[in-house]
Image: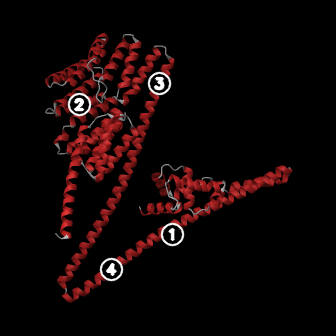
């Protein structure tokens, strides 16, 4: 058999084997996605990271998106706000270049759930859930449309958090009317939240019948969780009707059937109702016990401030000043945390919005230029066709030759203009660098002048020469009046090199502000002596600082720190 035939056979075999292995890996990744979906164990988190590595290894973008989805939900459940925002950003960035409409709709719904229930970001959650509802409503995918009742229920929860109870009731009633054929589980969710809305309005007479409907659903479809939920929430209606002992007796009975803590546990509701009932009966110690239990088990982050306020009130009634103060401090920490997260989400949202607008403008500009070029090309084609029809073949050849030469010259002019533009840009940067260097020299001279004035003061004081003291004071006044702002150097650096400062911080976050300053001195071409004079330190100190910055960047001895920084500047300019 000839060598090239053997090579082709081996190539085909390798291609088939790779394809088969890739399909097996994708099937394994998809299987793990559903296996550990909404799981909160350490094993689940490890599985999500394993899925991510395997997906990245074979460029399986849907697998990467699914991993980001799971990690966002996982960190959100554990209230790790920074990690949650990180994986949200990763998902949304990748989804823009590799869309997955079905998964993205589910992602928005679950992101809204995490923001509302786990991070306490009600306003942001309301916006996200509304966006998810509108998106799914336009889709043809029936699987996602099943989420609409759940999304409506959670939008209503956001309005409950905002104390807009009537609006929540309106949304839930409309959703129930629009989703008569919805699945039993979705109907149960909507009825459950509707009963909650009436409870918030202090209308147990309307809440209890709805919870009995949930009980009927639970019995009909053998849904134990629905039964427990309904019975657990009916005790709160007993409390609202001031049947405190009945609420306690029923609460203690149903408490034995509650599951251990999980993302959907009923323990916090039960514990809080018992706490309120015991408080109403005057048993402060038991009220405190059950309220602490509710706090320890709740996953509703935005409910914690209210729970801590009640707990502080209980401690105050129990004459425990120390715990009262400590509880108010805990409440403040949680409130500050929620405000900080809201601020971060707000900032990230508008930063992303600005980037999106900038990108949209660039795309529109490119599209406009493309349309202009297309119109010009169409016009030129029509002109050529007209020439072909109106002129002879010889004249056509001559005219075509002329047109081609003109086009070629225009193309050369364009190339020359681009080259000239790049040179102008480089010259502009050089001028700015020279300007900065000049500022540094001026600064050094001023430092030297100030040192001379100081020496003059010293001599005048030592000799007790009143005339010299006045003369030195005059020199100092003149120096102060002639000097510009002390911030001129830092302002110039920031205005001329914003890109390189950002690039250094992004590529090497371990660099301190002092390290970045020495890098900028290198970019400006300052020697060790000039840098030392400017910073008023020893030359050895400057050399040590440069070596420290180079070590933090993990650069080898063969690599010049200045060349590396110049390369970063060039990359920023080209970008």
Please say if 279 is above or below 349.
above
Say few, some or many: other residues with alpha carbon within 10 Å of mark 3 (under 14 / 14 to 19 / 20 or more): some
- In the rendered structure, the answer to whether residue 42 lies left or right of residue 1 reads right
User: Where is residue 437 drawn, in percent x and y?
Assistant: 59, 63
Secondary structure under badge 2?
helix
Percent coordinates x, y for residue 571 in the rendering = 44, 62
Q: Which residue ends up furthest to the bottom in the rendered image?
A: 394
> Badge 4: how crowded within 10 Å, few (<14), some, or many (20+)?
few
What residue is shown with label 2? 172
Whole-percent x, y for residue 544 in the image = 60, 54
Spatial separation of the CA atoms under disc 4 and disc 1: 28 Å
Query: Mark 4 vs mark 3: which is more N-terminal?
Result: 3
Secondary structure under badge 1?
helix
In terms of sequence position, does the residue under pointer 1 or pointer 3 come before the other?
A: 3
- Determine the CA span between mark 1 and mark 2: 65 Å
Of circles 2 and 4, the one toward us is: 4
Q: Give the mark nearer the N terminus: 3 vs 2.
A: 2
Numbered badge on residue 427: 1
Q: Is residue 410 left or right of residue 143?
A: right
- In the picture of the structure, the residue carrying the numbered disc 4 is 408
In the displayed structure image, the side of residue 462 where residue 110 appears, left or right? left
The tally of labels here is 4
**Could you tell me which quadrant the N terminus lies in?**
bottom left
Measured from the top left, where is residue 529 in percent x and y?
A: 65, 60
CA distance for labels 1 and 3: 61 Å
Residue 536, quarter of picture: bottom right
Q: Tags 4 and 3 in contact by the CB under 8 Å rule?
A: no
Which residue carries the number 3 mark? 328
From this view, report whether residue 180 is shown above or below residue 239.
below
């Amino acid at each position: 058999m000839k060598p090239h035939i053997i090579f082709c056979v081996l190539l085909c075999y390798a291609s088939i084997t790779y394809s088969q292995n890739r399909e097996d890996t994708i099937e394994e990744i998809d299987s793990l996605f559903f296996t550990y979906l909404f799981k909160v164990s350490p094993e689940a988190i490890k599985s999500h990271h394993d899925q991510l590595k395997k997906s990245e290894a074979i460029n399986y973008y849907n697998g990467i998106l699914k991993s980001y989805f799971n990690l966002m939900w996982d960190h959100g459940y554990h209230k790790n706000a920074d990690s949650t925002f990180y994986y949200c950003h990763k998902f949304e960035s990748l989804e823009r270049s590799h869309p997955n409409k079905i998964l993205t709709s589910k992602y928005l719904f679950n992101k809204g759930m995490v923001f509302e229930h786990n991070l306490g970001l009600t306003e942001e959650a309301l916006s996200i859930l509304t966006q998810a509802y509108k998106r799914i409503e336009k889709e043809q995918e029936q699987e996602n449309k099943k989420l609409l009742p759940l999304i409506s229920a959670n939008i209503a929860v956001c309005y409950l958090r905002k104390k807009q109870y009537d609006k929540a009731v309106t949304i839930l009633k409309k959703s129930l009317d629009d989703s008569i054929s919805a699945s039993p589980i979705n109907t149960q969710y909507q009825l459950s939240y509707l009963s909650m809305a009436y409870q918030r309005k202090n209308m147990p007479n309307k809440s209890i019948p709805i919870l009995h409907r949930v009980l009927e659903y639970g019995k009909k479809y053998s849904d134990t969780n629905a039964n427990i939920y309904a019975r657990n929430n009916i005790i709160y209606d007993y409390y609202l009707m001031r049947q405190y002992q009945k609420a306690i007796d029923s609460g203690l009975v149903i408490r034995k059937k509650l599951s251990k803590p999980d993302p959907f546990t009923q323990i916090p509701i039960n514990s809080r109702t018992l706490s309120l009932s015991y408080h109403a009966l005057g048993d402060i110690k038991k009220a405190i016990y059950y309220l602490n239990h509710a706090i320890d088990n709740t996953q509703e982050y935005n409910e914690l401030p209210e729970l801590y306020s009640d707990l502080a009130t209980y401690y105050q009634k129990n004459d425990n000043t120390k715990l009262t103060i400590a509880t108010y401090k805990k409440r403040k920490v949680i409130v500050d945390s929620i405000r900080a997260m809201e601020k971060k989400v707000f900032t990230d949202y508008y930063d992303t919005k600005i980037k999106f607008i900038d990108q949209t403008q660039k795309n529109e500009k490119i599209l406009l230029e493309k349309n202009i070029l297309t119109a010009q090309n169409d016009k030129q084609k029509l002109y050529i066709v007209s020439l072909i029809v109106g002129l002879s073949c010889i004249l056509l050849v001559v005219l075509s030759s002329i047109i081609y030469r003109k086009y070629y010259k225009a193309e050369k002019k364009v190339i020359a203009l681009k080259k000239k533009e790049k040179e102008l840009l480089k010259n502009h940067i050089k001028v700015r660098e020279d300007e900065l260097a000049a500022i540094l020299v001026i600064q050094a001279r001023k430092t030297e002048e100030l040192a001379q004035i100081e020496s003059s003061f010293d001599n005048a004081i030592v000799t007790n020469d009143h005339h010299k003291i006045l003369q030195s004071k005059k020199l100092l006044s003149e120096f102060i009046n002639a000097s510009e702002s002390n911030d001129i150097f830092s302002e110039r650096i920031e205005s001329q090199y914003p890109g390189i400062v950002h690039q250094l911080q992004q590529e090497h976050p371990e660099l301190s502000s002092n390290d970045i300053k020495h890098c900028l001195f290198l970019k400006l071409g300052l020697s060790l002596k000039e840098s030392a004079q400017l910073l008023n330190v020893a030359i050895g100190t400057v050399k040590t600082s440069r070596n420290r910055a180079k070590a933090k960047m993990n650069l080898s001895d063969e690599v010049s720190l200045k060349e590396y920084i110049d390369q970063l500047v060039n990359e920023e300019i080209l970008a």
